[in-house]
Image (cartoon, rainbow, N blue to C red):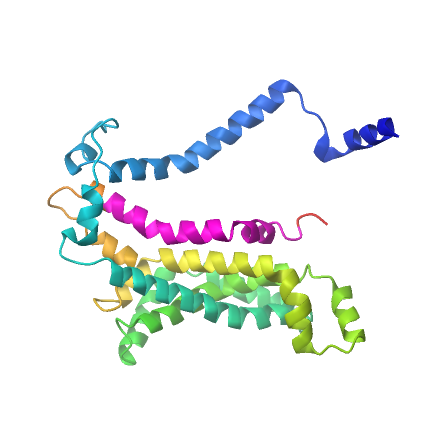
Amino acid sequence: MATLTVSARSAQPGTRKRSVPKRVLLAASAWIVALVFVAPILWMVLTSLHAETDAATNPPSIFAPLTLDGFRAFFGGSGLSPWPPILNSMTASVLSVIFVLLLAFPAAFALSIRPVEKWRDVMFFFLTTKMLPIVAALLPLYLFAKAIGGLDNIYLLAVFYTVMNLPIAVWMLQSFLAEVPVELMEAAQLDGAGLATILRKVILPVAMPGIAATALICFIFSWNDLLFARVLTGTAATTAPVFLTGFVSSQGLFLATVSAGALVVSLPVIAVGMAAQDKLVQGLTFGAVK
């Protein structure tokens, strides 16, 4: 029996034993790709811990003395506090994620579990909206915001982020909900469950990894936006990326301060990503293996 078990496992494609050179090559490739992605972050961290004069040297002085002057300059060294812009970014990002999920989930449900007529045309329409360059929509949005008195308003910016992320959210949720087994809903219907009960107790638990992945992607897109915030906000609704660009000047040195600020601004996204890591992996691989 043991021999048969080992033979059966060895016959599975995923557990097939690779040769040593091939394993070494795959491992080396994985490490190279990882270093390519991690190197800019490590460089940003190292630069943020150097003095401005050391950060601006060419070639860079990696082993220069470490200091927290860059963080001190970011947290009030210029006379401006970064907390209001960070709070504005958090407000706009969280609100837009809530609005996107409230709007995208019913649409994805109608396009996947109970498809409406010509649902493929509807999905193509959503896709075409993402092909439009964002800069092409800036002037109409600016004029619209100015006409209704919504310039420099964080809540209107959250609405614009909702519009920006809604197509990709519908696409993602439609693909996730399409993988929910229909038999689960049919069994719930036979037990007398209504639509609200099926959504809450059947579909939501199964699709939660996909919903979490969609929410995280939308949060990252909103948090990283610079173009909309740069044009549509002024002082009261300034977001963290706009505040960060204020340190870039043609006079003086700013690399360490900008690196420190970029590291601080990136922390919420990193924290959310690590907290939702399991859900994100499950959501992005949802339906990949049946």
Q: Position of residue 51 (x, y in %)?
A: 18, 36
- Report the label total: 0
Q: Is residue 13 above or below residue 140?
A: above
Residue at 26% from the left image edge and 73% from the top image edge:
151
Residue at 68% from the left image edge and 59% from the top image edge:
179
Task: Examine the structure image and report whether residue 263 is included in the region drawn in magenta.
Answer: yes
Left or right: residue 278 compared with residue 87? right
Can I make out residue 233 in this image?
A: yes
Q: Position of residue 211 (x, y in %)?
A: 56, 61
Q: Is residue 275 above or below residue 109?
A: above
The region drawn magenta spans 258-287
Q: Position of residue 99 (x, y in %)?
A: 46, 71
Q: Quadrant of the N terminus?
A: top right
Can I make out residue 112 in this image?
A: no
Quarter residue 65 falls in = top left
Q: Of 17 and 59, which appears nearest the observer?
A: 17
Q: Position of residue 14 (x, y in %)?
A: 71, 35
Task: Examine the structure image and report whether residue 145 is included in the region drawn in magenta.
Answer: no
Q: Is residue 84 above or below residue 78?
A: below
Left or right: residue 60 compared with residue 164? left
Q: What is the residue that sits farthest to the bottom in this orientation?
A: 148
Q: Of 214 and 209, which appears nearest the observer?
A: 209
Q: Is residue 93 above or below residue 9?
A: below
Residue at 41% from the left image edge and 69% from the top image edge:
95
Q: What is the residue that sits farthest to the left in this orientation?
A: 251
SS majority, magenta: helix
Quarter residue 121 falls in = bottom right
